[in-house]
Image (spheres, rainbow, N blue to C red):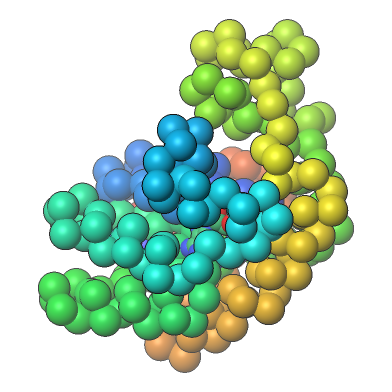
Amino acid sequence: MNLIFLGAPGSGKGTQAIRLAKKISVLHLSTGDLLRAAVKNGTELGQKAETFMKAGELVPDDIIIGLIEEKQASGDLNNGFILDGFPRTIPQAEALDAMFQRVGAKTDYAVLLDVDDDEIIKRLSGRMNCSGCQAGYNYPANMPQKEGVCDKCGGQLVRRPDDEPDVVKNRLEVYKKQTQPIEDYYRKQSLLKPIAGVGTPDDIFNRIVEGLGVA
Ligand code: AMP
């Protein structure tokens, strides 16, 4: 199954995409995770992407499309995948379709996690990640046993620099302006699966699984 996960920052798409990828045994590919790793390792890609990410802006299309084309060329997408955070603009969605056409693949569904703005801001201000294993926490709903310390590996919990309040505001604006139009792009192709992104993570997961018929 080839899936795309859409949703505003903080909609929970990363958490749900990871869980679903495990359940249906496909690759989970997050462009945000790839870029953060590149920044951390100081690679050429990371150096190009860092300024945009810090400001809550999108990394230019040609860079990000190149990244996905590399994954395709290396065979990583051959056995099903969930793309988390890509595409994020119409040119990216068109480039993905063109790439699929070249290799005879297709998108099965674009899952859209629907969450309103107030809830998004509340969630992002409580989001923390482990600086070691990247495990995600959310204050106050999902806190570690020991304040500031990862339950899984003992690493230090940190807030993503782009989760600071003024950057969050910009990321939401960028989402509305540049990413929301692709909801229509997939709706017109009858591929959009809107899912209410409210309730517990289990509730949301069950809705996704039911919506896709993969229970
Ligand atoms: P995320 O973890 O998906 O919220 O992504 C974090 C940041 O990485 C975004 O705010 C962008 O700066 C950048 N990024 C991730 N995916 C893309 C994409 N498909 N196109 C452009 N920029 C992206």
For residue 204, say whether it is visible: no
Quarter of the picture containing the N terminus is: bottom left
Residue 168 seen by the camera: yes
Residue 13 in percent (x, y) is at 56, 52
Residue 203, given in percent of the width and then of the height, sits at 62, 47
Q: Quadrant of residue 198?
A: bottom right
Above-or-below relation of 132 to 111 = above
Locate residue 36 relative to residue 170 in the image: left or right.
left
Looking at the image, residue 147 lies above or below residue 69:
above
Q: Is residue 116 left or right of residue 61?
A: right
Measuring from the top left, give residue 164's x and y in whole percent. 79, 44
Q: Residue at x 63, y 29 (%)?
A: 129
Tell me the residue at 77%/62% (across/down).
170
Point 23% across, 75% down: residue: 100
Taking the image in four quarters, ligand 1 sits in the one at bottom right
Please give left or right for residue 65 compared with residue 133 in the image. Answer: left
Q: Residue at x 15, y 78 (%)?
A: 102
Find residue 107 and report its horizontal and vertical position in percent.
31, 72
Q: Quadrant of residue 80?
A: bottom left
